[in-house]
Amino acid sequence: MRELKEEEREKVFKKLRIFVGDNLDAMLKENVLMLNQSRVFLSDRNLYKKCSQISKKQLISVGRVLGKFTKTDNFKITITGMQGMAKYGLHKVWLQDNGENNFLYGNNALKSHVGRVSENIPMNAGVFVYNKKDTPLGFGLMALCPTSYQKARSGDIVVLVQADTGEYIRQEEKLC
């Protein structure tokens, strides 16, 4: 387990800025990013300091998996990192009950499924998806600009899913 190199850090920051924007500084003030094999971990600074007595080769993980680097060396945020990012998220979308299961099966969120959205979400901005009870369900990219959202039909895609909590069941083997 080691700290990220500068090139790796830039790739991670670029992806995180899509979802947390300028809140990235606040997120990293409390946490540190570490790499083990191809997985990037988000760990509390104090916890990581306490683990300094364990050799880096023996240390398997500290914190939660934020994402991983693919074989082509791109960074992909996984669902396991959502809890660490959700409180710093800029944009939110709340789904109605009829769209919750659809979203959890990995399908995109349609206009008919959306209960409300936070104001002025630009197109292709990262959004966190919640149910009516403010439970985080996943995250994705906004597919519509604010002006076209009001004009959209009920079958139009609003959120392109990147990851959802249903992945814990569907991809149980890959997440471990």
Image (spheres, rainbow, N blue to C red):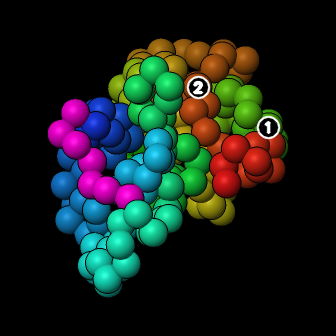
Instruction: Tell me the amino acid under the disc marked 1.
Output: Tyr
Q: Secondary structure at mark 2?
A: strand
* Residue 65 at x, y percent in the picture: 50, 55
Which residue: 38% across, 51% down? Answer: 35
Q: Kindly identify the residue that appears in the image at 73 percent across and 34 percent down.
A: 106
Q: Please tell me which residue is depicted at 22% across the width and 33% down the height of the picture.
A: 7
Which residue: 47% across, 42% down? 38
Sequence-wise, which precedes: disc 2 or disc 1?
A: 1
Instruction: Tell me how far mark 2 sits from mark 1, CA to CA.
Output: 13 Å
Provide the residue designation for mark 2.
160
- The residue stretch that appears in magenta: 1-7
| Of 88 and 35, the residue lying toward us | 35
On-image quarter of the N terminus: bottom left
Q: Position of residue 21 (x, y in %)?
A: 27, 42
Q: Position of residue 100 (x, y in %)?
A: 75, 45
Q: Residues within 10 Å of mark 2 (few under 14, many from 20)?
A: many
In the displayed structure, would residue 157 be above or below residue 117? above
Marker disc for residue 105: 1
Quadrant of the rendered image containing residue 54: bottom left
Check contact, mark 2 vs mark 1: CB within 8 A: no
Task: Give the total of numbered labels.
Answer: 2
Q: Is residue 2 left or right of residue 159?
A: left
Q: Rate crowding at label 1 as few (under 14), some (14 to 19) or many (20 or more) other CA atoms within 10 Å.
A: some
The three-letter amino acid code for the residue at tag 2 is: Leu
Classify 65 as above or below 39. Answer: below
Residue 125 is covered by the magenta coloring = no
SS state under label 1: loop
Query: For this rendering, which residue is in front, 9 or 110?
Result: 9
Within the magenta stretch, is there residue 4? Answer: yes
User: Relative to the observer, which residue lies in front, 111 or 127?
Assistant: 127
